[in-house]
Amino acid sequence: MDSNTEKIFFSYSETETEKFASEIAASLEVGSTVLLRGDLGAGKTVFSRGFARGLGCDDTLSSPTYTIVQEYMLPGNHRLYHMDLYRIADANSALGFGVDEFIDDPKAFKLIEWPERIESLLPQKCINVQIIHKGDEEREIRVKR
């Protein structure tokens, strides 16, 4: 996918969402930041599980809603930081727990749910993923680089 392009994918199951997320992850360079947007229940955690698998993570991925950040080791001595900022009020609150250190790590992939809470802290170059709940199992996933 070229820079500034948008890809739209329709998923009809959690398995399809995970597979698509895995393919996206496998296409990224170390240090990439992915912004994951969608309403509660849209499928962000499902996408995140597939994303982690696409990076070679065998750990069970859980939503970091209460811990804010989950860290996973990846092959090649890299990391995945999965951040859920739903409970963060704003960028200042995020700085209080050191979100900038996670975002600035060049040897880590960053997957950030609810990124609108920290827009001012995000790098200029990010991959934007929007998950839109269309039905019981149907999701529209928009990926823009």
Image (cartoon, helix red, strand yellow):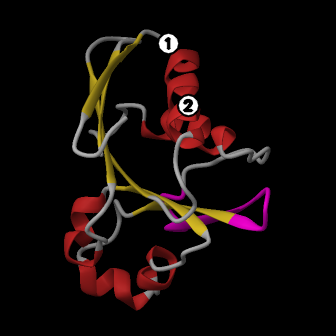
Quarter of the picture holding the N terminus: top left
Instruction: Identify which residue is drawn at 21% across, 69% down.
Output: 119
Is the residue 90 above or below the residue 15 in the image?
below
The answer to which image quadrant residue 114 occupies is bottom left
**In the image, is 106 to the left or to the right of 77?**
left
Is the residue 140 above or below the residue 38 in the image?
above
- Indicate the amino acid at tag 1: Ser
Depth check, front residue: 85 or 82: 82
Q: Can you identify the residue that label 1 sits on?
A: 13
Segment tinted magenta in the rendering: 64-78
Q: Can you identify the residue that label 2 sits on?
A: 23
Task: Tell whether label 1 touches label 2 (CB within 8 Å).
Answer: no
Residue 89 x, y percent position in the rendering:
25, 73
- Indicate the amino acid at tag 2: Glu
Residue 123 x, y percent position in the rendering:
31, 71
Q: Tell how many labels.
A: 2
- Disc 1, SS: loop
| Residue at the limit of the structure toward the front, as seen here | 2
